[in-house]
Image (cartoon, grey):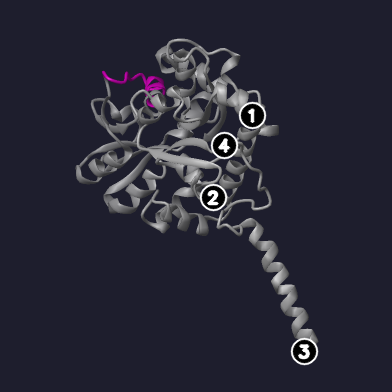
Amino acid sequence: MKKLLSLILILAAVAFVATGCGKDSDGNRGNSQDQAKVSEIIKVAALNGPTGMAMAPMTDMAEKYNISTYQAPTDIVPKLISGEVDVAALPSNMAAVLYNKTKGQVVAVSPMVMGVLHILGNGAEIESLADLKGKTVLASGKGGTPEYVLQILLEKEGLTLGKDVEVKWMASHADVVGALLTTEKAIALLPEPFVSTALAKGGEATSDLFDLNTLWENATGQPLPMGVLVARKEFADNKKADLDVLLKDLQASVDFINEDSDEAAKLIVEKGFLGDEAVAKKAIPNCHLTLFAGEKASQGKEMLKTFNETLFGANPEALGGAMPDEGLYYAG
């Protein structure tokens, strides 16, 4: 009897330790050991894609965060400028655009999503980017990173976006998926998790033609930061302790999504980011969720600087007309 009791106690202790990497007593995912508080609820905006998925575990932390997700960056920008939002996840080039537009009142905190862009086809016979000449590509995110990445890669093939290759801009990535799957010979530019969604729903006719992230790295020698975490400078300066708490919670959230894809897929569906667990599980590793904070902050800064220099060289308007100075990058 004593041996049985001892075994039960040992198993209970193991189960208790294990819960520290899953849900805490309040049902929160991530690192339950860090219960640091914030001075007031932080208002966060994310896009209904990888950045929103990365924050899914934090949506349970209502005592610290008010997280809203949006379909397009244009829905977030005015809220960030007006102060309705403290922190936001946006396409990488938007950090520089907003920095220039607000005369330095927005800072880039960290890359958050690495390369997620692909070109898909529905029965389209395309073997190289050069074959896109004379074609129309369905896409969403005009004025954002997808447009400028496509522009730069097409230029490497001697093609001009808007002249040799047309783009039909749509309101959302979900709209692009719908149009791709219902239009014969359609070609679409999409990020994850919409790539996995389209491939799962499209059947044999739908194929992944190009991984633009690989093409970008081959062309520039640098990885492609697709999404960036930004903050209002006033918030970053005056609420540094709160921002530090958010970064710790976000790192735990990202780690949970990347390391426990089964539970993460369930949560992503539960929170409404995707409707199918199998698709979510497949999309997670392709979303390349990350965070460059603390000791890795300088690495993230150099990555963003290189990205900005590449875009500025191709089209200054991609960054709002001017190359941002060092003030863009959050010092931590």
Distance between mark 4 and mark 2 Cα atoms: 26 Å
Q: Which residues are magenta?
A: 150-163
Name the kind of residue labelled 1 in the image: Lys
Is residue 123 visible to us here? Answer: no
How far across and how far down the image is residue 299, in percent? 64, 28
Q: CA distance from mark 3 to mark 2?
A: 41 Å
> Is residue 143 at least partly visible in the picture?
yes
The label on residue 240 is 1
> Does the CB distance between marks 3 and 2 fall below 8 Å?
no
Report, in whole angstroms, how far the alpha carbon at label 2 lies from the one at label 1.
25 Å
Check residue 160 for magenta coloring: yes
Q: Which residue is mark 3?
A: 1
The amino acid at mark 3 is Met
Camera-nearest label, 4 or 3: 4
- Residue 134 locus on image (x, y percent): 23, 25
Residue type, numbered disc 4: Glu
Where does residue 159 sit, x and y in percent of width and height? 33, 20
Report the front residue among 61 and 229: 61
Name which residue lies at 52% across and 58% down: 263
| Disc 1 to disc 3, C-alpha distance | 55 Å
